[in-house]
Image (cartoon, grey):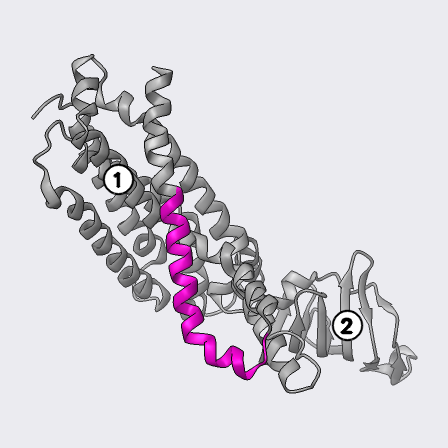
Amino acid sequence: MKILNRHVLLAYLIPFIVCLLAFTCMWIIYDLIERLGEFAQLNASTSDVLRYYAIQIPGLLPMLLPVSVLVAAISCTTYLVRSGELVAMLACGVGVSWISTPIIIAGMLTSMTQLFLECTVAPKAYRDRAEFLEELRAQAKNRERRAGPRIRSAVYFNQTQKRIWYLRRADVPTFTLTDVEILQMDQSGRDIWKIFAKTMSHSADGWKLGDAVRVYYGYESENLPLLKNISHTVAKELSETFTQVATGVYSFDAMDQQELRVFLSENANLSPVRKAPYLSAAHRQLWSWAPALGGVLLVIGICLKSTRRSGLAGVGTPIAIYAGYVLVDQFFFALAKSARMPHELAIALPHMLWITLGAVLFYRRARTISE
């Protein structure tokens, strides 16, 4: 049985690796053709171009993994059918469940990998790509690189500490904010002090200020100076982390699971319409395991037959169903982002239908010995 499992697993892994590499190269070539003129204008070297695409590969994999799993499973099952090996296995008393176990386990591992990438690495990869491209543009214009994505009227409100942060720019790699105003209020909402900082960076010691001043309100009754220079000091009273403050920099599709949770917890007072894209993105990341696993079950249920007469329809049907699933998923995701439908239902419904369809077809195929 171990030899049989290794044989089936090898028949699945080879096309899976080939498809993943082929799809990755195809996407890079397509994107390179689109950006070739821009790279020429920026005088980008070969190493710059290679680094640009290497940065975004972790963000590209979650999009390509389900398709690669689907094609690999189709290739594996059709190979077993057309070579007559499936009939030989069934004749020896090996059931469909045992035959498909290596493929299902590989699909589950791929699903967990995709879940990990979607929740952690993929959003950051797209941010790093945008940051690197901005660096190339800045170098081409012989100016200093703009420190991170531009923020227009971005505000972070710490409701617990009664502090409001006004940000203009943020540089994620160095944990640095530029052009910052921090307003501290008391519990009744009256202003206590405000910090104006040209730059400030976050580390394990806290927020280190660059050129900065602190303006006090009510200084006459508290015997405090009106203006105090606090440049190049550490603001111990600021308990916020860089992730908390900088979440306002990114759009919902460029934030990982932790950043989305921080943003939602720290911005609980936002209107349902403004929170809907972030809630939808966070919920969708948690369902990112479904496409790969559902695709494996679907392919086994449709293509793993004890007859060679399935023809092209047996191969094209899973692809057509997967294309329809992707369209339905995008449609319901748009409804969730616009708050026209509860995000839990809109995000979960397509994936639940996809998994259920795959499980039903697999169960029916597992109970069928011959056709």
What kind of element bears circle 1?
helix
The quadrant of the image that shows the N terminus is top left
Q: Which residue is mark 1?
A: 75
Q: Is residue 98 or residue 92 the one in the foreground?
A: 92
Please indicate, yes or no, whether residue 193 appears anywhere in the rendered image: no
Amino acid type of the residue that numbered disc 2 sits on in the rendered structure: Met
Picture layout, residue 326 above or below residue 90: below
- Residue drawn at x 60%, y 66% is 47
331 left or right, relative to 109? left
219 left or right, relative to 134? right
Q: Which residues are magenta?
A: 17-44
Bin the neighbour count of mark 2 within 10 Å (Cα to Cα): few under 14, some 14-19, many 20 and up. many
Amino acid type of the residue that numbered disc 1 sits on in the rendered structure: Ser
What kind of element bears circle 2?
strand
Whole-percent x, y for residue 249 in the image: 58, 71
Picture layout, residue 246 above or below residue 304: below
Q: Earlier in the sequence, mark 2 or mark 1?
A: 1
Q: Quadrant of residue 220?
A: bottom right
> Foreground mark, 2 or 1?
1
State yes or no: residue 4 in magenta. Answer: no
Q: Which residue is mark 2?
A: 200
The residues bearing labels 2 and 1 have C-alpha atoms spaced at a distance of 55 Å
Whole-percent x, y for residue 163 in the image: 69, 70
Please indicate, yes or no, whether residue 278 appears anywhere in the rendered image: yes
Whole-percent x, y for residue 50 in the image: 55, 64
